Amino acid sequence: MALIRIPERQQTISGTAEVAKFLAGHGISHERWESAPRVPPDASADAVLAAYADKVDELKARGGYTTADVIQVTPDTPNLDTMLAKFNREHWHDEDEVRFIVEGRGLFHISPPDGPVFAIEVEAGDMISVPRGTHHWFDLCTERRIRAIRLFQDASGWTPRYTESGVDANFQPLCFGPSFVRAEDSRRAM
Ligand SMILES: [Fe+2]
């Protein structure tokens, strides 16, 4: 389930309805789908798209998206740091950034024009749509693992456009989901 943190206010927002309401106030759609993956971890991209065809078709109809693909990142992904470096600096796109998280976790930071930066931690079962033009950046959590369905109105519009503001350097890409809890537990056990 997605979790929101607003570092400047030291505020955390949890709960499906509360998260969706907060994000809607920033034009961001969030829905909670089922968290149990419909496919095994080694399923092909085509198998993932086939398994979620009903959801993908619904989103396409709703948002005018024409294509969908699957992105899969693991610690073994070649040139992972180079890939991640494209997205962990503040940028925007000329089309919506729509993701359904099939497995793993990640962290979006959003920098609204009229309010403090906030972080959205997403995990399996979360669907998020960040509108075109929204200033944001993205990091993986400590497991460095995510698989997500991406939808595009026009894939050519999805190039990152960097603000070069440097604001991203002020925020730690810290996730507070299961791995953080496990780390806390292990420290207590030591
Ligand atoms: Fe992006």
Image (spheres, rainbow, N blue to C red):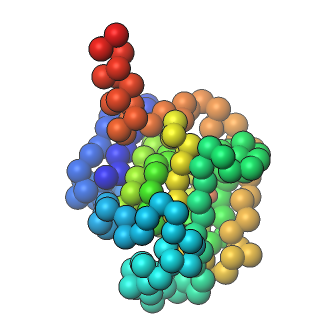
Is residue 177 or residue 168 the one in the foreground?
177
Q: Nearer the viewer, residue 113 or 178?
A: 178
State the residue at coordinates (56%, 71%): 44
- Residue 18 % position (x, y): 24, 53
| Residue pictured at 49% horizontal, 74% vertical | 48
Which percent across, then down, holds residue 51?
42, 79
Instruction: Residue at 32%, 34% (x, y): give it.
Output: 11
Give the quarter of the image for residue 54.
Answer: bottom left
* Residue at image point 37% right, 45% down: 4
Q: Is residue 112 visible?
A: no
At which x and y percent is residue 175? 44, 37
Q: Is residue 15 left or right of residue 96?
A: left
Residue 118 at what x, y percent from top left? 45, 43
Q: Quadrant of the C terminus?
A: top left
Image quarter for ligand 1 equals bottom right
Q: Is residue 39 visible?
A: yes
Whether residue 64 is situated above or below residue 97 in the rendered picture: below
181 vs 92, left or right, is left
